[in-house]
Amino acid sequence: MNTKKSSKTSSPDVVLIGAGIMSATLGVLLKKLSPSISISIFERLDRVTAESSDAWNNAGTGHSAFCELNYTPQLEDGSVETKKAIKIAESFEVSKEFWAYLVENGIVEPDTFIHNIPHMSFVWGSENVDYLHKRFTALTRHHLFRGMEYTEDKNEISSWIPLVMNGRNPDEKVAATRMELGTDVNFGTLTRSMFDFLEKQEGVNLYLNHEVDDLKRNREGAWTIDVKDRETGKSRKIQTWFVFIGAGGGSLPLLEKSGIPEGKGFGGFPVSGQWLVCNKPEIVEKHQAKVYGKASVGSPPMSVPHLDTRMIDGKKALLFGPYAGFSTKFLKNGSYLDLPLSIKLNNIKPMLAAGIHNIPLTKYLIDQVRQSPQDRLEALKDYLPDARLEDWDLEKAGQRVQVIKKDKKEGGVLEFGTEMVTASDGSLAALLGASPGASTSVSIMLDLIQRCFKDAKSPEWQAQFKKIIPSFGRSLATDANFAAITRARTTEVLQLNASHLEEELTA
């Protein structure tokens, strides 16, 4: 699309629906690329980042594929697939470049949102140990995973994560990997800082408590959007040349209302979650790592168990989970009618097919919903053998909607990831799905801009892209030396631990 204005001067060039990490990232990028662009942002709740971007609703791992075992599946021949892990690791480095740019331009302070926390994978049992060693061997062939450590030595693992080893059966075979470069990211704080910046920019308006009820394309090719003020009950129409639907679980219903052919056949499967949060500061202080294990058979990626050190609003926290559940809501603050109302003639077949092909997932979710406090404690004890129920509180996590899409062979498949759907003319884009979402938000939004904005190919925008993201147009996944230089620079700007980067720069 072109960034021309509509005939109505009050109509913005761009409308962003949803005030989360995706809209904030897109808004800042567009304003830096084209300072004169006008942007209106509509959020149905009374504050930004109230859903998936909130620290308590988001894993906050800074997904870089260092520890998440679901990004490195074991194939039938016994080998470990690393393509997805490498792609995610590269995308996270791109995110750090953008965040470093925000820091250098005074938009955010690094110590408010990002901290070094080692990323670890921990497994037990001979079969899982064998898998983890294969994973380590496969990943460390690639420069983005240089510095990863592997051990089966119980004493060494105890020095890394003492609480995980205390009380464990001494005869149990265990293994762990560790990446000191791992981070914890408070996406809520980061997002709020970006919106604080956007609100100060000329031509940008943020409307809270405003819900988009409908959107239609008119004869001129622009979009007419019906927006309701939830406080006053009054509705109004907005006209714009570009719409981004970044409303988390609320994106699918709006995509369906848009009527674009590219959105036909998509469905959504909602998965809720809960955390156990440690209430004993003395326990919290004894753990300093994000420890990911293997998911149960049939469980969704967002349910991969992990014992996380978190920094939330300047305070150290320790979380375990998430425990999955099922709700027909698409948002934590959504409606129980979200799922039934999302079923249309064009997506009922893919949704039914995906359901038939994912019966183990359905059984898993039923089992999770039926869990007692003692059941949750037993799951925690896999990671903390000495855990006591009274030391932990159960808290609600975020609501995720996994993507269901058409598939010629299967009829419909459940996608565990993110999916960008764009209109053929580039006038509308919608982001569906969940993990690793926030961590790769910058790469996702860069791709969106290049798909939807014709100005993206102009020399002016190309030069600005490279100013914001120095690696733009180059591959951090294939250029080891440039990746090392980039990682060292962002590590310094973001005030992270650089002790493990000297080897990369001299390799």
Image: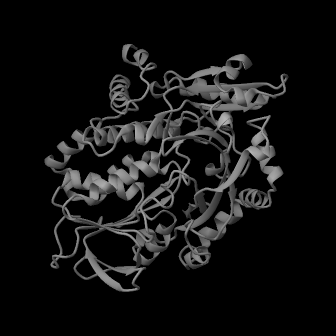
Q: What is the quadrant of the N terminus in the image?
A: bottom left
Q: Residue at x 15, y 76 (%)?
A: 9
Q: Is residue 93 in view from this perspective? A: yes
Q: Residue at x 68, y 64 (%)?
A: 326
* Residue 43 in the image, given as x and y percentages of width and height: 40, 68
* Residue 141 in the image, given as x and y percentages of width and height: 51, 23
Q: Is residue 240 above or below residue 381?
A: below
User: Which residue, as the protein is rendered here, is positioned at the far top?
Assistant: 506
Rendered image quadrant of residue 504? top left
- 94 or 396: nearer the viewer: 396
Left or right relative to 471: residue 145: right
Rendered image quadrant of residue 479? top left
Q: What is the quadrant of the C terminus in the image?
A: top left
Q: Residue at x 75, y 42 (%)?
A: 380
* Residue 311 in the image, given as x and y percentages of width and height: 52, 41
Q: Is residue 456 above or below residue 100?
A: below
Q: Is residue 458 above or below residue 409?
A: above
- 207 or 8: nearer the viewer: 207
Tell me how many marks there are: 0
